[in-house]
Amino acid sequence: MPDDEGHPAVEEIELGAVLAALADPLRRRVVRELARAPEGTARTCSSFALPVSKATVTHHFRALREAGLIRQVDRGNSRMARLRRADIERRFPGLLAIVAAEDAD
Amino acid sequence: MPDDEGHPAVEEIELGAVLAALADPLRRRVVRELARAPEGTARTCSSFALPVSKATVTHHFRALREAGLIRQVDRGNSRMARLRRADIERRFPGLLAIVAAEDAD
DNA sequence: CAGCAGGTACGACGGATCTCGTACCTGCGG
DNA sequence: CCGCAGGTACGAGATCCGTCGTACCTGCTG
């Protein structure tokens, strides 16, 4: 299963795309919160209370999904986002720890 | 000495700026080559043979310098760039290894 | 059923960024 | 001294990216 619904496979995750995704403060905040949460934590897009419009939230989550940082699955009404912790750790060991360690504003 | 000639001090190095700098393939290539070279290696801007004009090279090296990834010192005619390995390792342990491990094109 | 909450798609706008050419400065070599 | 190589500064053009409003779809829930 190479790519279902915009999710790249593990070996398709590219460093450039990941770094570009993490360069944005809002996206880094999402990844940071997920990285600090227990393994397997799934949250809705809106649960992060990002200070931007709905359309912009969708835009950022698409960027995270297409970079391979999160996996989004439909669950009835809404959509749950989970960090692809093992996949990222395997490709770029230590990267998530760096993001998780950043001081929150 | 907090900031001489556009070089941020160690504690001033910000993750967002570093990731933004590393999001560019050309800049990542520079950092990768420096990270793979022996500690203390100093090279001129032009020694990287980037496929862009001189002005653009200057632009990219400025980005790397202001992000805190490299240190540039005048040496007579030209300017030597050295990776701030210890500083980056201290702020974001493991990050340089990730960049260094990327497959070259 | 009617409405609302969560998300997406599309188009638009403004600002950032990558790129370049040109002009300019500074040392080193002939 | 003259030229050239290495870099920088400045301005311009093109493209990318973050942001938004609006319209729309889909399930809950009353």
Image (cartoon, coloured by chain):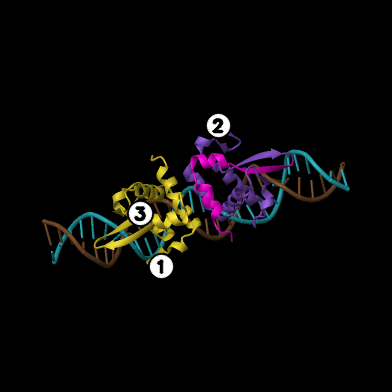
Chain colours: A yellow, B purple, C cyan, D brown
Q: Residue at the top extreme?
A: B1
Q: Would you say residue B97 sits in the magenta stretch?
A: yes
| Disc 3 residue crowd, few under 14, some 14–19, many 20+, Cα 10 Å | some
| Disc 1 residue crowd, few under 14, some 14–19, many 20+, Cα 10 Å | few
The amino acid beneath tag 3 is Val
Tag 3 subunit: A
Q: Quadrant of the N terminus of chain B?
A: top right
Whole-angstrom CA distance, mark 3 to mark 2, is 37 Å
Magenta stretch bounds: B77-105
- Residue C24: x percent and y percent? 72, 43
B45 w.r.t. B12: above or below: below
A89 w.r.t. B66: above or below: below
Tag 1 subunit: A
Q: Would you say residue A73 sits in the magenta stretch?
A: no
- Residue A32: x percent and y percent? 38, 47
Q: Residue at the bottom extreme?
A: A1
Residue under pointer 1:
A3
Q: SS at mark 3?
A: helix
Say which quarter of the image contains residue A72: bottom left
Residue under pointer 3:
A57
- Callouts 3 and 1 on one subunit: yes
Residue under pointer 2:
B2
Tag 2 subunit: B
Q: SS at mark 1?
A: strand
Q: Verify CB contact (< 8 Å) between mark 3 and mark 2.
A: no
